[in-house]
Image: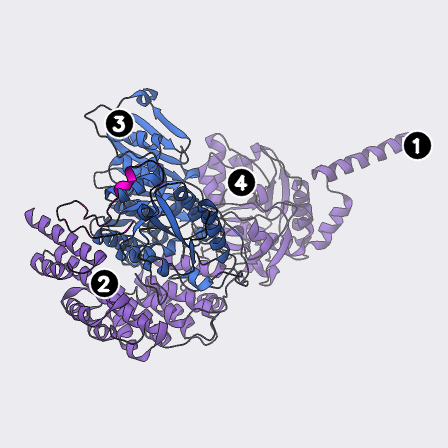
Chain colours: A blue, B purple
Amino acid sequence: MKSTVAAAAGVAGFPYFVCSSAFGQAGRPAPSNRITLGCIGMGGQGTGDMRGFLGKKEIQVVAVCDVDKKNLDRAKKLVDDKYGNSDCKMYLDFREVIERKDIDALLLALPDQWHSIPAIMGARAGKDMYAEKPLARTIREGRAICDAVHRYGRIWQTGSWQRSVGHFRRACELVRNGRIGKVNKVEVGLPTGGGGGNNPVQPVPEGVDWDFWLGPAPWVPYRGVMHWNWRWIMDYSGGQLTDWAGHHIDIAHWGLGLDRTGPVEIEGKGVYPKDGMYDAPTQYKFTCKYADGLTMIVANDRQLPKGMGAMWYGEKGWIHVNRGGLKAEPKSILDEVIGPDEIKLYESRDHTQNFLDCVKSRKETITPVEIAHRSISVGLLGEIAMLTEEKLKWDPEKEIFLNSDKANRLLSRPMRAPWHM
Amino acid sequence: MSQRLKFTVIGLSAICCLSLLTNCSGAVSPQDVKRIEAAMPAKAVAVPKRPRKLLVFNLCKGFRHGSIPHWDKALEIMGRKTGAFETVVSGDMAMFSAENLNKFDAVCLNNTTRLGFEGPALRKSLMDFIKGGKGIIGIHAATDNFYKWPEAAEMMGGQFCGHPWGGGGTWAVKIDDAGHPLMAAYKGKGFKVKDEIYRTKPPLYSRAKQRVLMSLDMTDEATGKNAGPDDTDIGLSWVKSCGKGRLFYCSLGHNNHLTWDPALLEHYLAGIQFALGDFPVDTKPKPLISLGKGSEMEELFEKIKKYDYGQSRAELTEVSNMIRDAYGSPQKLKQIESSLIGVLKSADATPAAKQFVCRKLSIIGTEACVPALTTMLTKKPASKQEPHPADMARYALERIPAELAGVALRKALPNTSGKAKVGIINSLGQRRDSKAVGALSKLVYSSDALEADAAAAALGNIAGPDATKALAEARTKTKGKLRLVVLDGYLKCADKLAAEGKRREASAIYRELSTEPAPIGAAALRGMVTVRGSRRR
C-alpha cells in the first residue's frame, strides 16, 4: 500500500493513507495492498507484539530492527518462517527503517529512554505507529510525541491492551454510567518492585551495540542490565510504577472520563533501594487530587486493600477490576444493563486489529496518543512527587508545576549527544 | 560411684544437653561464670557518687530468651567486681510499685518481652521514676514490650519488628559516634558480631529523637543482603534523656557468648553508669551526617570522589537523601552545592563520581556551580570507557534555569566540536534560548551533518520570530534529510503562532508549506484547517 496525499480538505484527519478496495475481499490482500510494517525493538515485548501482527492477513512485516544481533536474528527467522521467504530486512539503526518510504507503519517496543525519538521521527516521516506503553520517560517527551503525532495526522495505538478486553470496558461503562453513584475515591494497585544485586562492570556481549542501546541516557558501562531488567533503573524506566501506569491508571482514568486531563495536586512517598545497581522504587504510594475533588491513590499492590487493579469507590458502592475479573458491591451492579441512551465506551475486542482498522479508516484508536500521555503522566508526576517529597501543585493544561522549581526541572531529561527530540 | 550419685550425674548431663539444644538454661554453668568474671572490666567507668542499686528485671510474657540467666549473672558480677552498683534480680511486677521502685537508682529490662504494665498505678510509678531523674536500661529484647503503652514505647526509642539478621549469622557493626564516651571500648573501630539483631523502625526509632551510638554496617555484603528495602538505618545502641531521667539501650546480647565479650561488657558498664546517674554523657540527638559539622561532610564527599561503577552506592544514597531533606532550606542547599562543586573541581574524583554530582546539580544547581560545569564543556574524556565530560556538564546546565547557564552554553559553542558541540546545540534548543538563534541560524549550514540537523531542530524548538525567519530562509537553502528537519521546525513555528492566536501569520506559513510533498504538505493542510476552525469558534 502506498501513501499518497488526499488533499480533499474537509475529510476528517486528512487521510493520505488511502485504503484499497482489496480489503473487502476474502483472504489475504495482494502484497501491494498490505500494510507494510517495520518493527523496532525486538525484545520480549516487541517480539510478542510482532507475532500479533504476523497473524494479521493485511500486514506484511518488512523490517526488523534491534541493537542486539541475537534479537534481530531471532525476529527475522520468525518473519521468514511465517512468510516462507527471506524478504524481511534487518537493521541495527532504527533511522534507516523510518527512512524507508515503502513502510507504512511502525511497531515500537523499546526501553523507555528510547520512546520519544523514534516516535517523533516516525511521525515526521508519515508513519502510523503501534507503540508500547508507557508513552514516554518524561512528561516533556510525552507532550512532544503528542504534538508530532497530531501535527502529522498519524494513527497511534498504545499497547495498553486492557482497553480491548471486555470486562475492563464493562467496569468502566458501569462507573461512567453512575452505577456506583458519584465516585469520590479511586485506588490503583500496581506490582511491587523487584530487582537486587550489584553486578560488576563486564564486557558487552558480542553482537550488542551498547552505546546505541543507551542512546539518549547517560553513559554507564555495561553491567548485565539490558533486556527486561532495564526497568529497575531510573535512567531507563520508573520501575513497576511507570511500567504499569499504562494499564491500571489508564483504566481508572477511562472509567472516570478523565483520560484527557490530569491531577492538580500530587503527594507521596516511595521506598528506594539504598544500594545495589537498581534504583527504581520497590514500594510507592502517592495521592492525586483532581480538579473536581476526586482522589486517586496509586500504590504498589501490597499497600492497598484490594491489591492489583483499579478500584472505584462511589456513593452507592464500589467496583474493582483487574486481570482476574470484575467485582462489585453491591453484587447486583454486575447484572446491570447499560441502556441505549447511556454512555457507550469505545469498543475494541482486539487491540492489534483496532490499530489496523484505524490505519484504514483514519479514525482514532482506542488508546490514542493523548490518552497514553495522560495515563503515564500520573505515574511520572507521582515519581517526581516521591523524589522531591514535596506536595506538588500541577497545572494539567500548561503541564507545569506551580510550586516547585526542582519538580519542574524533572519534567524533562537532558539527552546524551547527539540525540535530541 | 554409688547408684544414686550416678543417677544425679546422668540427670545433670541431660539437663546440660537440653540447655545446649534450646539455649535456655536455668543456671549459668561454672565455666561460663568464669568466662564472665574474666572478661569483666576491673574498674568502674566513673566513681559512684553514692552506693547505687540496680533492679534487674527479667519477666517475659512473650518469648523468653535463653541468655537471661547469663545477663542476670553478668550484671551481678559487673556490679560486684567494679563496685559500680548492687543488683537485685526479680521477675515480680510488684517491684514496680512506687514504694519498691524508689529503693533503686535504675531499672534494667533484661530481655523482657511483651510487658504490658496493665493498670495505671504501675505505669505511673515507672514513668515518675524515670522522668523524675532515675534511669532505665534495655538489653536486646527490651524493645519487645509496651505494645499498648505508646508513651513507654516512645521512651524506649524503638519497638521490635523482626530480626532479619539471625543469631546464627555474623553481622557487621559500624561505630556512628566514635568520640562518644560510651563507645570508648571500641576505639572507633567497627566490628563483626555473631548475634541476633533486633530491627526497630521509624518513627519510634529516630536519630532525631535519640543519640545513636552504633548501627548495622550495610556495606558489608552479608549484612546488607539481609536488609529489606527500607532497612537503611538499624541502630544497635543509643542513649536519650527522658524528662530528668536517662535511657540506655543496646540490642546486642541474644547469644550467651556476648556476656563474656570484654568490649560489649565495657559498653554496658558505661551505659549502666550513665543511666544510674554517675556518668553524664551527651544525649543530644544527632543525624547520621550532620550538615553543621564540616569534617563529617568532608569525609562523606571524600568517599564520593572515589565512587566507581559497580561499587556500593550507599554513600551516594546518603548524599541524595541529604539533598532531599535540605529542600526548603536554601542555606543548607548552598552548603551541599559547594561540596558537590568541590568534587567536580577535584583532580582525583572519578568520572563516575562527577557524573553523580552532575545529576544532583541538575536538580539543585544554581549560578554557583556554572563555572565548574563550564570547564567540563570543553574537556575530552580520557577514554571511551567513561562518560563524556560535556554530556555530564550539560545534564546539569540544561536544567539549571539561571541565565548564566545559558550564557555558558552559548559561549562554549565556538570552542567545541563534534558531539560536544551537537549536545550544546540540543541543550540550547531544549532551553528555548532565543539568544542562541543567531549562532544556531549559521550552524544550520554547517558542513557537519549532525550539527546542522541539531541546529535546525533547536530552532524549531525555540520558535519565536527570529527562529521562524531563520527557518524560512533555510527552507530555500537546504535539501534532503536536513531540509525535512528544517520544514518540521518551520511547522512548529506556525503551530506556536497558532497557539498564541496569531492566526494570519500561522496560516501564511501553513499555506507556504502546503505544496510540500506528503508528510509536510499534509501536516500544513491540517494546520490550516485547525486555524480556520479556531477562528470559527
Q: Residue A315: which disc?
A: 3
**Residue denoted by label 4:** B102
Q: Secondary structure at mark 2?
A: helix
**Residue denoted by label 1:** B2
Q: Residues within 10 Å of mark 1 (few under 14, many from 20)?
A: few
Q: Residue A376: which disc?
A: none
Q: Residue B461: which disc?
A: 2
In this orientation, which residue lies closer to the viewer: A230 or B182? A230
Distance from disc 1 to disc 4, alpha carbons, whole Å, reads 51 Å
Instruction: List x then y, in percent, for residue B76.
Output: 67, 46
Magenta: main secondary structure equals loop
Residue in the picture at 65% in, 44% down: B71
Indicate left or right for B288 with B508 as reference. Answer: right
- Marks 1 and 3 close (CB-CB < 8 Å): no
- Foreground tag (2 vs 4): 2
Q: Secondary structure at mark 3?
A: loop
Q: Vertical placement of B404 versus A273: above or below?
A: below
Q: Amino acid at mark 2?
A: Asn
Does the magenta segment cover residue A259?
no
Does the magenta segment cover residue A21?
yes
Asked if badge 2 and badge 3 are on a common chain, one would say: no
What range is drawn magenta here?
A: A1-29
